[in-house]
Image (cartoon, grey):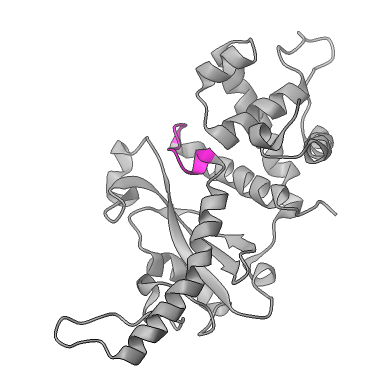
Amino acid sequence: MLHQRTTGLTPQQFTVLLTALTAHITWAKPGGRPPALTLAQGLKVTLFYHRHNLTEELLAEIFNTSQPTISRTLNTVDKALEKALRPLEQSLENSLKIPGSLVIDGTLIPTWNWRSLRKINFSGKHKRAGFNHQVICTLGGKLLAITDPVPGARHDAYAFKHHGLERYLDESTLADKGYIGLGLATPVRGSKARRMPADVKVVNRFINSRRSVVERVIEQVKTWRVLHTGFRRPLSVYGRVFAVVRGLVFYAAGRTFE
C-alpha cells in the first residue's frame, strides 16, 4: 500500500504524478518484450530510491527483480520525471517575490565519487566532497527556493553571488556569518581584542534565534535521503537527479501542476 513514509507522497499525489509521467515516457513498447516492472512499480522504485537512498541490490530484492533492471528503471524514470516535474519549477525572481523577511543558508549535499574532483568538490568546512546549494525560506518555515549546485569547495558567499541572489534578497534577509558583507542581516563577528557590547550580543541572539528556522527546513528537505546520506551514482547524472528530487520536495509540500 502506498504511504508517505515509503514514497514520500500521499496516495493521491502518487496517482497524479503517475498520470503526469505517462505523457513523457513510453514504458511498454508495442510488440516488444514486456517490462519486468509496471510503470507504477517503476515510479515506486524511483521514489523509494530518492526517499531512502537504498542500494540497487536491495531494491532488486524488494521488487523481486534484478539489479540491472533497477538501474535501467532509475535512469529511465528519472529522465521522464525531470520533464514531468518541470511545470512545478519557478524562477528565483518569482519564488522570492513575497513580502516579509526571508532566511537563507547553504547546505552541502555529500557525494561518494569524489577522488577525481577533490579539488573543486571537497569542502574543507564539512571535511567531505559534495555540492553546495542555497536554501531560502520564510520566517514561518515555508521553503521558497533551492538553488542549482555549485562545487562543494565554494563557500556560501561565492554561491550567493554566483546565483545573483543580491537581486532578490536585501538587508531584511537573515543569514549567518558566512554572508557578512553581502548586504544581509547577519550577526556581528566577535573579536578577541575587545569584549562584545551587550546590545550587540542581544542583536546576535535575535538574528540567530530567527534564522534557525532555515536549518529545520534543510532537515526536512534532507528527509529525501539521497540528499543526505551520500550520492552514490555517477556525478554526471547528479544535476538531473537533484532537479528531480527538488521537484519532488516541492510537489510533496503541496505545489501542484495547475
Q: Residue 172 placed where, x, y %? A: 54, 83
Question: Is residue 246 left or right of 179 when viewed as pictured?
Answer: right
Q: Is residue 258 above or below residue 205?
A: above
Span colored in magenta: 225-234
Q: Vertically, is 205 above or below 219?
A: below
The residue at 52%/47% (across/down) is 222
Where 90 falls versus 57 (above or below)? below
- In magenta stretch: residue 152: no
Relative placement, left or right, of 145 versus 115 is: right
Please identify the quadrant where the C terminus is shown.
bottom right
Q: Residue at x 76, y 24 (%)?
A: 39
Image location of residue 84, percent across then percent down? 75, 42
- Number of marks present in the image shown: 0
Between 212 and 50, which is closer to the camera in this rendering?
212
Residue 148 in view in this figure? no
Q: Main secondary structure of the magenta part?
A: loop
Question: Measured from the top left, where is residue 27 in percent x and y?
Answer: 77, 22
Quadrant location, the N terminus: top right
Q: Residue at x 72, y 40 (%)?
A: 9
